[in-house]
Amino acid sequence: MLVPSSNTTMETEVPEVLRRVAAETGDRFTFHSSRMRMKTVSAEELAAMNADSDRAAIELADAAVDVMAYACLVAIMSQGRGVHREIEKRLTRTAADAGAPVDVVSSAGALIAGLEHLGARKVSIVTPYMKPLTALVADYIEAEGIEVQDAISLEVDDNLAVGRLDPANLPDIVRTLDTRGADAVVLSACVQMPSLPAIPAAEAVVGLPVITASTATSWQLLSSLGAYVPVPDSGALFRG
């Protein structure tokens, strides 16, 4: 995975999903990452991180990985509607040129693909972002034909602080979401906000399918590898 330098969550939650899959199948996974500098979730630092993503992909290519994921949802969604397709194609070319002809997916693209896989046409979302960035994320999702019914912004701009948010608070936060007519809830529209342990409780609160940026990324990675299987307590995308 290509991750922000201040990431502390994707390198715990994605391996945990892989561990759950391995427990079901006996498959063995190794997990590797390359970091791009970003400490504050601002437009300037997100743009700089995007510019550094080719270097990170080349480093991962040296490890002869089987699939790569650009694991920063807002870095992509803040760059304009539909841009995940362009970035995924560019990084795929970069990896191939560096000797690793593999699929390169993204958390932004995985979230959209995951919602489409569930048939969700209307969602409510929770983000840790400041409200202007949440608005960009909502606009991005809506440009893909999925209505955002409601969005909660926790307004934390320090990325390390985002990674220290307590996922145990998420079910109560979700109670305040307007989910009328929604098909699904995006519990964490951010790869850095911890959410995996809270998914079962959040689903019990809202009575709707729940996905997150990290579970969508895990689902996309495993699907690319042909290694997907349903596993418990991992949200709607892992119920088969």
Image (cartoon, rainbow, N blue to C red):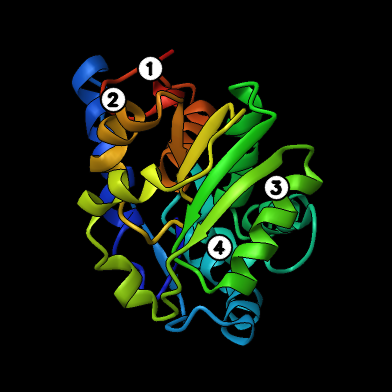
Q: Which comes sooner in the sequence, label 2 or label 1?
A: 2
Q: Nearer the viewer, mark 3 or mark 4?
A: 3
Quadrant for the C terminus in the image: top left
Q: Find residue 207 and report its image quarter.
A: top left
- Measuring from the top left, give residue 124's x and y in whole percent: 56, 42
- How far apart are the two marked residues, 3 and 4, measured between alpha carbons? 26 Å
Which quadrant: the N terminus? bottom left
Q: Residue at x 26, y 30 (%)?
A: 28
Label annotation for residue 229: 1
Q: Mark 3 = which residue?
A: 141
> Where is residue 145 shown, x and y percent of the image?
79, 37
Q: Could you say which is closer to the camera, residue 64 or residue 15?
A: 15
Helix, strand or loop for disc 4: helix
Q: Are marks 2 and 1 in contact (CB under 8 Å)?
A: yes
> Residue tagged by mark 2?
21
Which mark sits nearer the N-terminus, 3 or 1? 3
Residue 97 location, quadrant: bottom right
**What amino acid is at disc 1?**
Val
At x 43%, y 21%, the residue is 228
Mark 2 to mark 4: distance in Å? 25 Å
Q: CA distance from mark 1 to mark 4?
A: 27 Å
- Count neighbours of disc 4 (C-alpha within 10 A) and say few if under 14, some if 14 to 19, many if 20 or more: many
Name the N-terminal-most of marks 1 and 4: 4
